[in-house]
Image: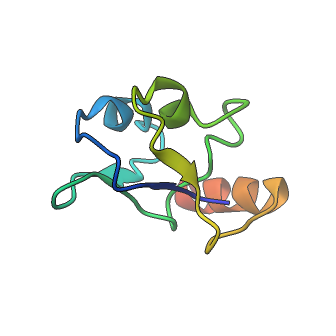
Amino acid sequence: MAMMITEDCTACGVCVDECDENNAISEGDPIFKIDPNLCTECVPYDDSPRCVEVCPVDCIVEDPNHKETKEELEAKYNKIHS
């Protein structure tokens, strides 16, 4: 499933650099946002979402509106990078 950023975001921007593979994170108003069409939870190139690992306020969570299996995330990644 894609990740999402909650209103607890402090807009520090640390997560943006971690999403350099898919560029799913962008600056929103007033907080950053994750495009569910580009977020693959870092599948297949990492074991867990890197943005979650670096977020200093733990405001990046699974998006319940965009549930996907690992296979679906891999297919999305391949489509993005084809």
Residue drawn at (51%, 65%) of the image: 36
Instruction: Give left or right: position of 61 versus 57.
Output: right
Total labels: the figure holds 0
Q: Quadrant of the N terminus?
A: bottom right
Residue drawn at (68%, 33%) of the image: 48
Q: Against 72, is 47 above or below?
A: above
| 23, 33: nearer the viewer | 33
Quick one: which residue is furthest to the left in this view? 29
Q: Position of residue 54 (x, y in %)?
A: 46, 24
Q: Quadrant of residue 17?
A: top left
Q: Against 35, is 43 above or below?
A: above
Q: Against 48, is 67 above or below?
A: below
Q: Against 30, is 54 above or below?
A: above
Quick one: which residue is furthest to the bottom in this view? 65
Residue drawn at (16%, 61%) of the image: 29
Instruction: Give left or right: position of 55 versus 14.
Output: right
Q: Position of residue 58 (x, y in %)?
A: 48, 36
Residue drawn at (81%, 53%) of the image: 70
Q: Position of residue 26 (x, y in %)?
A: 28, 52
Q: Quadrant of the C terminus?
A: bottom right
Q: Quadrant of residue 19?
A: top left
